[in-house]
Image (cartoon, helix red, strand yellow):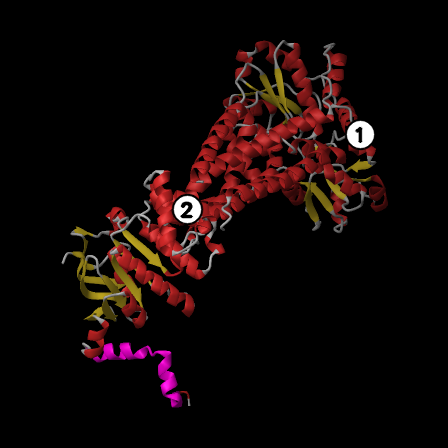
Amino acid sequence: MYKKIKKILLALAVLVAAMLHSAVPSAAQVVKIGSKKFTESVILGEVASGLVRSAGHQAVHQKEIGGTTILWNALLEGDIDLYPEYTGTLMAEIFAGRNIKSDAELQAVLLEKGIKMLRPLGFNNTYALGIKDSVAARLGIKTISDLKQHARLRLGLSNEFLSRKDGWPGLKDRYELPQTSVQGLDHDLAYRGLESNAIDVIDLYSTDAEIAYYHLRILTDDLNYFPRYDAVLLVRADLEKKSPQAFAALEKMSGQMTEEKMVKMNAASKLRRVPENQIAAEFLAETFGIKQAAAPEETMVARLWQNTKDHLSLVAVSLLAAIAVSIPLGVWAAKSKRAGGVILGAVGVIQTVPSLALLVVLIPVAGIGALPAMLALFLYSLLPMVRNTATGITTISPALTQSAAALGLPPAAKLWRIELPMALPQILAGVKTSAVINVGTATLGALVGAGGYGQPILTGIRLDDTSLILQGAVPAAVLALAVQALFGAAEKVLVSKGL
Amino acid sequence: MVSIFKLEHIVKHYGGTLALDDVSLSITAGTSVALIGSSGSGKSTLLKVMLGLVATDGGTAQFENTVIAPQQSLALRQQMGYVIQEGGLFPHLTVSENIALMAEHLDWPKEKIRARLSELFALTRLPEHFAGRYPKELSGGQRQRVGLMRALMLRPKVLLLDEPLGALDPIIRADLQHDLKEIFQSLGATVVLVTHDISEAAFLAETLVLLHEGRIVQHGSLAELVRSPASPFVTRFVNAQRSPLESLQSPQSTI
């Protein structure tokens, strides 16, 4: 029996090694483009990709990976070569506290970090507050200052806006706004909330396609609170040496966009569901005369298959590695009281770190893509397995451990033949718990570009497309159930009938 | 007269309580000895000292002129068979896996293991078709027989039994007592038995060692304990366990 377990463990170790190897992509000379998880950023990323390709280079677009922090760190670490950003965000968020006033100053600071800011693309996408036109007319609200007279209005603000230094906290102070009902929510869901009258005022980007569609009024920033948010490309300085043609092609994008064009492109994606690569291709053809064969759209089955492969490899690699580490740690914790306190304390603390925070922290170590997601999942998987292994062993009755000792069985044999097999039901229960949690948490991997079932969920939320969200949510739920069933079966095979 | 166990001035504390207080005892090879006494008298602890399961706080314990030290006593323990209440069987192993555990660990050939198992099933009068069952599928008496087989598997020089029949009902207990006595006689091995039942002790062992509060009070046959008690406690202990027939003779005791 224990020889069987040894064989299984060995096979698992080999599998983990093989999967880890395949999960790390080879570093070929390609230009890596990143974009934030909102439509405008994705479109700009697609346009940039097209320009890079027109210069004869390969381009990989890591679409919709999280927010500012994740992309900025990925750029600094060289996991991506460029991404579209806004000057306001750079001044007020990334370099907050440095009191940068002009684009020239900004350029200098960025260059110190090895980042080049190309000349502005040509449009200003500033933050703004929006309200339904009908409500605004009824209450006579035209400016942000007018909000002071209507303390009962409910605000639904995007989570990033709520926490940004140039967002809600500063706005509230500057205008002395009295509203107390302030909710954080996803920006793409905010429009729905407004439409259904669940909230009255939202933050928005001035190039959002929905402004016209939902008949919204943008409130005048009468105290000039919001800075300019000129769209720019941030490019790693070393790209100019590595691929000068690509760099030159990207510079062509400067000054070619207007607010009007951007709103139109956003509308094409969000309201007419035109794929972003097609929108970008049209823009490239019109503006630069660049003709590209638009990549054929992926079929739903192909996409599902790809997401399934990505998701499974995230779960399998992280879980197998966690099993290989947790069980020895659990045994150690059971054998030594002092080590046990430290080990269980440490894995317990890891569990309390919010998953998004953990992903961001891991970027400098592991970059973006599958690796940081696997690392995060690995860390989250430890606690249930370590704890169950330790309790499984410590709860074996003293009479039995004494029996084993009295037989003259050495400690290693005692562990393999008595303690681990007796603790096996508990250990497997821990593995099952970790696996199910893992399947769910792995959907967050899409935020760092790891793909998986989180990808359609993320895109679905961005495009307000329920069927796309379900393409991620349903298979994730099915996979969780399948994992549960698999471990039920494993328990029947592996656990002794005598227990 | 070769003494197989030689204990000299053994002292053992458990926290603040003194479990063994200067105990010296020598056990001759091939004899049977019962350690008796009430609970807390130190009799089980003394047995564990012989096995090297507990470290002593003073004195020396020797098995065939080798010092018993808990850290190095694995090899010694393999020469001793140990049986506890309910058999102490591992629930995840079948009857034959429990019995053959150590033999397999020592890489005995399969044939040798099979032959030894057959002998033991015959010796303990357990049908061989029980071999594939799990402990939870056995009665208390059957588990005890399996525990005994496991203790005997490696042909130990001594058999140490800690309240082996403690959890059994009277009829099964009586059956097993008879079987045990036969087995002891046929093996000719040294037997050390812990029990609080003086009649069981007298039935199964030649010599009785009475312990009280961590000290040996008297060492001798039942007849010696009855006729020349070393202290009033010995008489109290011997008289405390009545036979049921006594109550018949004095019905007034039930009022």
A403 on left or right of B54: right
**Residue at horizontal 62 percent and vertical 36 percent from the top:** A443
* Residue A271: numbered disc: 1
Where residue B219 sits in the image (x, y, percent)? 19, 69
Where residue B148 sits in the image (x, y, percent)? 35, 55
Q: Say if labels 1 and 2 share a chain.
A: no
Q: Which stretch appears magenta?
A: B231-253
> Which residue was labeled with disc 2?
B97
Identify which residue, A207 or B255, lies in the foreground.
B255
A264 on left or right of B117: right
**Residue at horizontal 69 percent and vertical 26 percent from the top:** A303
Return the chain for callout 1. A
A57 on left or right of B110: right
**Residue at horizontal 54 percent and vertical 44 percent from the top:** A491
Q: Amino acid at mark 1?
A: Leu
Spatial separation of the CA atoms under disc 1 and disc 2: 70 Å
